[in-house]
Amino acid sequence: MDGVLSQEEISALLANDQGSADKNTDGGTEILSDSDKDAIGEVANISMGTAATTLFSLVNRKVEISTPVVSMANWDDIVAAYERPCVFIRIAYTVGLDGTNLLVLKEHDVKVITDLMMGGDGTNTDGELGELHLSAISEAMNQMMGSSATSLSSMLSKTIDISPPVADLIDLQDTEDEGQIEEFLTGEFVKISFKMEIGDLVDSEIMQLYPVSFAKEMCASITQNMAPETGADNSAVPAPEPAPAPAAQSMEQPMMGQPMMGQPMMGQPMMGQPMMGQPMMAQPVNVQQAQFQPFSGELNPAFQSENIDLIMDVPLEVTVELGRTSKSIQDILDFAPGTIIELNKLAGEPIDVLVNGKYVAKGEVVVIEESYGIRITDIVK
């Protein structure tokens, strides 16, 4: 053999390369590289960190989300990881990115989050998951993923927006539910796993599911955004010109009659130094005693009166609070004409007077002609 390939051998090699490329891209089942997984993990880490801060403001509990783990998965992997019905929350990107991702939460976690959002202590998790729970978790995810999209906009340097999330309860053991959310669940997709803790109430795993095409688009956006920062166009930067060689005389002793740099000419003083025999002249400095205005504990009555008059006509809202009580959502839904609500005030006990929501006085109810009134009995200091 002379080492030269024939035309038939070259055609066969090209055919094999084309067949390999078709296998890698057929049906959109591209396998992500390690760099792609790192980029997606970094995006998910920043996005879910912002979402955790938003969730904390909604449930008033400490929320911790661990570092994400990115992997490839299919529907069987999801079924094996979650054995009971789960809540699938669909988030579609409408601006900046073209695609959809799913957030998977356990049924118990959704009940705890919705109970905390409604003012409970997170322990009211009995009963089935209903439309009220799904609506509440959709609103929570709308705020969480909205803040996540804002962080993503800063990272990609372009506007990112989402549509209102849609939550559904999916039975993972029922294969008919596999295609109920998105078609990409029937093939291979990207799974991002997080460990979520909410106080001492929730300690479980949540998942984010991406289509491979959406993950590739996100990686391409990150690469495109980072390209200018890495100085990809090095050819446009001119190379620095070498400095000119120093003159030959600069390397030798100074020429006769020329002083060295920094030395004075003969008979001339150095800059900043007085000549021999001349005294240094001090610059006069003007020093004065500090003057302070006397402080007095008394205010000018005329000045004070003038200031308070400026706000005398500002209206304030006065509220008389007869009493309060707490009711569950179920009790409120059972309200009907004739329902009696027991308050936390005893009969004959003084009622509270509030000005712009601030408790200022106590009083008793009186009747003035055909209207109710309040007689002030005590001023709160």
Image: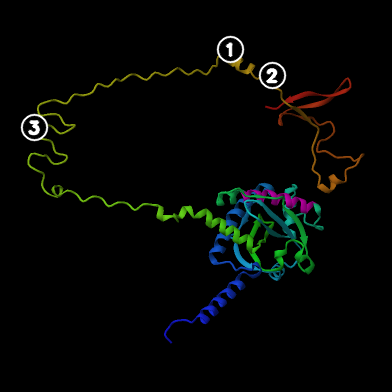
Name the residue located 52 percent from the left edge and 19 percent from the top edge. 297
Q: CA distance from mark 2 to mark 3?
A: 84 Å
Label 3 sits on residue: 267
Q: Specify the amino acid type for callout 2.
A: Asp
128 relative position to 233: left or right: right
Nearer to us in this view, 290 or 346: 290
Which label sits in the foreground, 2 or 1? Answer: 2
Check disc 2 and report the residue beneath it. Answer: 313
N-terminal of the pair, mark 2 or mark 3, is 3
Residue 19 as seen in the image, left or right of residue 88: left
**C-beta proximity under 8 Å, tags 2 and 1:** no
Residue at left offset 30%, top offset 51%: 241
State the CA–CA distance, disc 2 to disc 1. 19 Å
* Rendered location of residue 86, percent (x, y): 74, 62
Residue 88 picture location, percent across and down: 73, 59
Could you say which disc has been placed on residue 302 in the image?
1
| Residues tagged 3 and 1 counted as in contact (Cβ below 8 A) | no
